[in-house]
Image (spheres, helix red, strand yellow):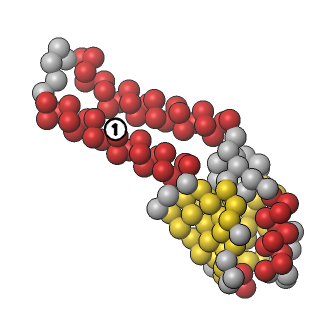
Amino acid sequence: MIFRSKVDRIFVITIGMAILILAASCFFPYFLEDEVPLLAGVILTSTFLLCTGFIVWISIDIRYKLNDDHLFIKAGPIRRRIPYNEITRVSPNRDIFTGFRILSSSDGLEVSYKSAIMGGVKISPENKELFVTELKKRCPNIKS
């Protein structure tokens, strides 16, 4: 079963601001110089497009998949497999600024597991109740 990440307005504004700052820093030389060399223009434009593409890829491709034996979390190239036997707790969490997080909303969950470096991973499935219900079916010993 696949769950998409919930997206809130603050996340969209933050990503938009990051892209605007990136654009301003990449294209600033165009405003300083009368004529920018072709190679410099190609490098600046390529840098902007690659960085923006990476930010957008990570931002819109967030998924949480409940497989037979593990929870699979994916955000662009970032992937995490968490075996169900390692999951100890799932709890509501509104703190999006600390820890390992793959989410796009402040209304999320923290999945704690044994081998986690920072205690767990913060996620934000669109339907939290259904996600927790399905997770408990696959891992009945977790605390919530």
**Image quadrant occupied by the N terminus:** bottom right
Instruction: Name the residue that disc number 1 marks.
Output: 48
Judged from this view, the residue extending furthest toward the top is 34
**Secondary structure under badge 1?**
helix
Q: In this orientation, which residue lies closer to the viewer: 67 or 86? A: 67
Crowd class of label 1 (few under 14; some 14 to 19; many from 20; radius 10 Å): some
Classify the position of the C terminus by image quarter. Answer: bottom right
Residue 141, quarter of the rendered image: bottom right
Whether residue 36 sits left or right of residue 17 in the image: it is: left
Q: Residue at x 34, y 45 (%)?
A: 50
The image quadrant of residue 108 is bottom right
Is 76 left or right of 113, judged from the image as shown? left
The reply to whether residue 53 is in sight is yes
Q: Residue at x 27, y 17 (%)?
A: 31
Residue drawn at x 19%, y 17% is: 33
State whether residue 86 appears in this view. no
Q: Residue at x 52, y 31 (%)?
A: 17
Amino acid found under the numbered disc labelled 1: Phe
Q: Within the image, what quadrant is residue 66 found in?
A: bottom right
Q: Position of residue 23 (x, y in %)?
A: 38, 30
Q: Please state the horizontal and vertical placement of residue 69, each as a whole percent of the image.
A: 68, 84
Residue 3, how many percent across, how many down?
70, 61
Can you give x and y, in whole percent of width and height, for residue 55 in the image?
47, 46
Q: Residue furthest front?
A: 1
Rendered position, 98 above or below 1 = above
Q: Is residue 101 above or below residue 90?
A: above
Disc tally is 1
Against 74, is 97 above or below?
above
